[in-house]
Amino acid sequence: MEALKQKILDEGTAIGKDIVKVDGFLNHQIDARFLERIGREFARRFDGCKIDRILTVEASGIAIAVGTAPFVGYPPVVFAKKAAPNTLKEGFFRAEARSFTKGKVSSLIVSEKYLPAGESVLILDDFLAYGEASLALADLVRKAGSQVAGIGAVIEKGFQGGSEKLRAKGYRVESLAVIRKIENGIITFEEDDPAGEEHAGE
């Protein structure tokens, strides 16, 4: 998505060799108008897929999922919690996700009533790095007796191998902008996205 790449270059910040800070428009402050374009692009990428539900993880994935829902038929949006709240008394599904950035393992939890069996679930998130969060979300879908329609990320750090890991397990992965490398404060992207992308003036 060329507009996204340009926005990352204009408003994002590269830190070291593996961190891209985009909190000005994506995961701290949100550019709602641009979020709509992201939602439309995910809808285009997954056009033809049966989507009964969108699954993401708190907190930064929630806006992405909610912003996409109107363009794929308003399916329910469910987000996995990173800790079981006191109010969660009934059954729930749990999966473990390792965060290489934070250096810890988190439990992702979803109530069973919000992830029923027999559905086609689209997984969305803001970033895809090593793929651990997406694998954990896919594990929740499997435990629920449903199937993964696809996995979408707004920004993928391609050099960390997450998409290859997910595709090796048979999942369809769509990333709107794929970063090939970060060097000396300069972000380099992979080649252009698939044909048919929404144009800037639309």
Image (cartoon, rainbow, N blue to C red):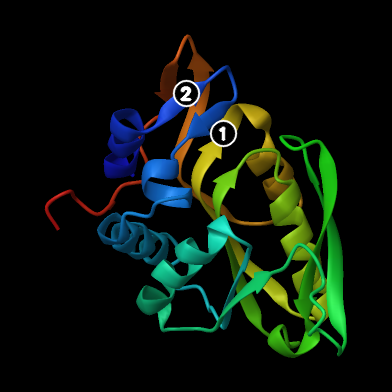
Amino acid beneath label 2: Ala
Alpha carbon of mark 2 to alpha carbon of mark 1: how far?
A: 12 Å
Residue placed most toward the observer, 165 or 12: 12
Amino acid beneath label 1: Lys
Residue placed most toward the observer, 7 or 28: 28
- State the quadrant of the N terminus: top left
Residue that mark 2 sits on = 14
| Image x and y of residue 56, in percent | 61, 65
Say if 110 sits above or below 128 in the image.
below
Identify the residue shown where x is 11% and y is 52%. 201
From the viewer's perspective, is 103 left or right of 4? right
From the viewer's perspective, is 68 left or right of 152? left
Say if 28 sits above or below 87 in the image.
above
Which element type, helix, strand or loop, lies under badge 1? strand
**Quarter holding residue 69:** bottom left
Earlier residue among tags 2 and 1: 2
Say if 160 sits above or below 187 in the image.
below
Identify the residue shown where x is 31% and y is 54%. 31
Can see residue 47? no
From the viewer's perspective, is 5 left or right of 60? left
**Quarter holding residue 192:** top left
Can see residue 132? yes
Residue 157 - label: 1
| Image x and y of residue 117, in percent | 76, 87
